[in-house]
Image: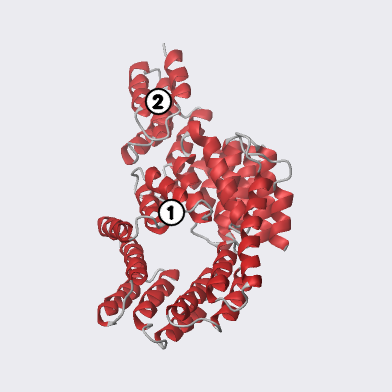
């Protein structure tokens, strides 16, 4: 398979800090697939065996093979098994981002005996592919009118409702839905995963929920990705993040989000050769993925190649003109070249495009300091700490600006604030404090 070959090339000789070898993880994933494949071979008329194999293929990112297997097993499925098979086929179409085919599968579920309740949740999940929260909630409202809703249906209905509430920025309602799903099925990973990911997104600590999701399903690539994201900003946990990302990719070799995250983690750890291999792999898998070009540019910038970074950023903007991360990459590349005016203009635009990202303000502060523009550095630093008071790098950047302005008292206060904020590297902060006069 092309994707598997790309990934194998990308990780030749790469190990996780702590001794876990990525190729071993990939072998474990293939071994897990082999087990369910063998069961399906030995039990060719078993709908359950076919369903297990089809699900495993979908999770591994092999949706075409999954559909083939699920359709084969669907022939033998009766009763609840027929509903489950049709629903799983719809989910596989969702994974392929084929909305029309997913909707058709959901409609077929509705025609089965006792299938209407499941079909409403199935249809809600299909709408969520295109972030249609209102339509999803309308389908879920019909669930109350449909007889025979099983515990499985009610569980997934709560998950779909939570996702819909998130899209409507009703985070407290979404949290309540996820917690209800966990109450309904405490030993299922999905509720813990969605709750932990949401908490992390809104700036709360969702790590314990995400770890619980991985405990319950150690081979879920999405759970592994989210655990890695939750700890990646902590310098002391960088190796843990890399391990999680590598495991996620081993479980699903075509998982572009995990590949991008792994590339960024390698750059942060200064493992540039590894980062470059994976960045090349991402672009081979997804040449039109905007953020794949951005992470490729990040590697180039870390290698001291700002011109290549600029080209990558400009390519990303061709694909999506209002992508803040692409504009930030361009700003950083200009700063690296010493073109401070162009850099500051790009930082301003990047901040406007992605106002929830502190990086444009932090990086603008650092670029101004490097260019000797202390007054501008203080202004950007002040904006950063006002907008992102719990972001340690913002306080560090402001402390650096104040120190450059010969205000050690104010700089010390900023560094002390950084120690209490998220993402604090205490060794770095203590070093800065010790250098203050």
* Res. 286 visible in picture: no
The residue that appears at 57% across and 64% down in the rendered structure is 56
Few, some or many residues within 10 Å of mark 2 (<14, 14–19, 20+): many
Q: Which of 110 and 50 is in front in this view?
A: 50
The residue drawn where x is 40% and y is 34% is: 394
What's the distance in space between the residues labelled 2 and 1, CA to CA?
26 Å
**Quadrant showing the C terminus:** top left
Q: Is residue 380 above or below residue 428?
A: below
Camera-side residue: 232 or 373?
A: 232
Q: Looking at the picture, how far across and down is residue 129, in whole percent? A: 45, 70
Residue 40 x, y percent position in the rendering: 62, 71
Q: Residue 251 is drawn in which quadrant?
A: bottom right
Taking depth in this image into account, of 99 and 251 the one nearest to the observer is 251
Residue shown at 41% from the left, 71% from the top: 125
Residue 288 left/right relative to 88: right
As drawn, is 337 to the left or to the right of 88? Answer: right
Depicted 71 relative to depicted 230: above or below: below
| Tally of marks | 2
Measured from the top left, where is residue 62 in percent x and y?
62, 66
Quarter assignment of residue 407: top left
- Numbered badge on residue 353: 1
The dot on residue 399 is 2
**Which residue extends farthest front?**
42
Name the N-terminal-most of marks 2 and 1: 1
Q: Residue furthest bottom?
A: 111
Q: Is residue 93 above or below residue 346?
A: below
Mark 1: secondary structure: helix
Check disc 2 and report its element: helix, strand or loop: helix
Vertical placement of 164 versus 10: above or below? below
Q: Do the residues labelled 2 and 1 touch (CB within 8 Å)?
A: no
């Amino acid at each position: 398979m092309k994707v598997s070959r790309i990934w194998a090339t990308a990780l030749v000789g790469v190990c996780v800090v702590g001794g876990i070898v990525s190729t071993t993880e990939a072998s474990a994933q293939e071994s897990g697939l082999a087990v369910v494949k063998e069961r399906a071979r030995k039990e060719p008329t078993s709908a359950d065996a076919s369903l297990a194999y089809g699900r495993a293929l979908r999770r591994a990112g092999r949706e075409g093979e999954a559909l083939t297997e699920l359709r084969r097993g669907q022939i033998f499925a009766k009763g609840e098994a027929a509903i489950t098979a049709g629903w799983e086929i719809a989910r596989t179409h969702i994974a392929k981002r084929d909305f029309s085919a997913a909707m058709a599968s959901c409609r077929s579920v509705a025609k089965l005996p006792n299938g209407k309740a499941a079909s409403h949740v199935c249809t809600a999940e299909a709408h969520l592919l295109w972030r249609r929260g209102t339509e999803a909630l309308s389908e879920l409202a019909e669930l109350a009118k449909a007889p025979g809703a099983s515990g499985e249906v009610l569980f997934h209905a709560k998950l779909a409702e939570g996702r819909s509430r998130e899209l409507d920025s009703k985070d407290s309602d979404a949290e309540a839905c996820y917690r209800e799903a966990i109450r309904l099925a405490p030993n299922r990973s999905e509720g813990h995963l969605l709750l932990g990911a949401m908490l992390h997104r809104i700036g709360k600590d969702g790590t314990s929920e995400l770890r619980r999701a991985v405990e319950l399903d150690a081979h879920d690539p999405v759970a592994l990705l989210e655990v890695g994201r939750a700890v990646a900003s902590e310098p002391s946990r960088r190796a843990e993040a890399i391990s999680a990302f590598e495991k996620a990719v081993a479980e699903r070799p075509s998982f572009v989000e995990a590949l991008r995250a792994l590339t960024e983690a390698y750059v942060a750890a200064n493992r540039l050769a590894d980062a470059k291999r994976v960045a090349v792999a991402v672009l081979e898998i997804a040449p039109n993925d905007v953020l794949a070009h951005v992470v490729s540019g990040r590697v180039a910038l870390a290698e001291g190649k700002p011109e290549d970074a600029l080209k990558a950023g400009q390519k990303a903007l061709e694909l999506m003109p209002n992508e803040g991360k692409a504009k930030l990459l361009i700003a950083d590349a200009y700063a690296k070249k010493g073109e401070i005016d162009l850099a500051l203009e790009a930082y301003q635009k990047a901040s406007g495009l992605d106002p929830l990202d502190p990086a444009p303000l932090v990086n603008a502060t650092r670029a101004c300091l490097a260019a000797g523009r202390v007054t501008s550095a203080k202004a950007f630093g002040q904006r950063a700490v006002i907008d992102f008071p719990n972001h340690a790098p913002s306080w560090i950047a402001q402390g650096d600006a104040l120190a450059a302005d010969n205000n050690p008292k104010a700089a010390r206060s900023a560094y002390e604030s950084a120690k209490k904020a998220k993402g604090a590297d205490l060794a770095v902060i203590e070093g800065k404090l010790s250098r203050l006069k």
